[in-house]
Image: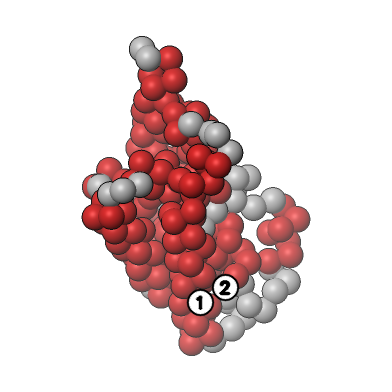
Amino acid sequence: MLKFFVVFLVVVEPISLIPVFVSLTKDGTAAQGRHMARRAVVISAIILTLFAVGGGPFLRLMSISLDSFRIFGGLLLFLISLEMVFARTSGTRTSSQEELESRQRGDISVFPLAFPFIAGPGAMATILLAFSPTAGKPLLFLGLLLCVYGVLLITLGVLYLATPAMRVLGVTGTHVINRMSGVLLGALAVQFIVDGLRGSFGG
């Protein structure tokens, strides 16, 4: 459970949201920024809860084995980790056209903050990998769900403190933290791939 919490926290990357959030909310008031942050986290919680509840049954309905999805999820998380290490704008989260559209919006809570920045493809893949084996294990399911909500609360706190944190860390500081997190995520992603290959081929 601790491993899942760490992986999910690294995938969501709350620190990486600081410069984006500050940039997209600079024309509004602090109260408006906090309102959008709260709304984004609530919407993300709904999206991720739906994935946690329906992800496993969906994989079984599509006859996709957990090991196959573990390999894909590991590859996706590995790509995200490379983007973090090299401090590049994540193509797994948003495209250049979507980023341009987001800068023209007054309310960014749904797009791009909730999706794809918080509840993005990486977060969804992590949810599916963790929750698929919880069928018939309500306590494990509840524990993992509390971990998800814990990460979202941390994300909300980071967004609340985004402006002062940006003054302290700056762009360089956020990139350094993201690079360190990217190395950890890369190692965990490789482990997902190895476990998936071992489960698929019985090695």
Residue type marked 2: Ser
Image coordinates for residue 28, horizontal then vertical, percent: 59, 83
- Which residue is labeled 1 in the image? 39
Q: Are marks 1 and 2 in contact (CB under 8 Å)?
A: yes
Q: Left or right: where does residue 155 sit relative to residue 150?
A: right
Looking at the image, which residue is at 28% across and 49% down? 137
Q: Left or right: where does residue 137 sit relative to residue 120?
A: left
Residue type marked 1: Arg
Name the quadrant of the C terminus.
Answer: top left
- Which residue is labeled 2 in the image? 109
Image coordinates for residue 167, horizontal then vertical, percent: 42, 68
**Image position of 162 with respect to 70: above or below:** below
Q: Left or right: where does residue 148 sit relative to residue 49?
A: left
Secondary structure of the residue carrying numbered label 1: helix
Front residue of 198 and 167: 198
Dot 1 surroundings within 10 Å: few (below 14), some, or many (20 or more)?
A: some
Looking at the image, which residue is at 29% across and 58% down? 142
Image coordinates for residue 144, horizontal then vertical, percent: 31, 54
Secondary structure of the residue carrying numbered label 2: helix
Label located before the other in sequence (1 or 2): 1
Regarding residue 196, the answer to whether it shows in the image is: yes
Gap between marks 1 and 2 measured at Cα:
6 Å
Looking at the image, which residue is at 55% across and 42% down? 61
Dot label at residue 58: none
Front residue of 7 and 45: 45
Q: Quadrant of residue 101?
A: bottom right
Image coordinates for residue 157, horizontal then vertical, percent: 36, 71
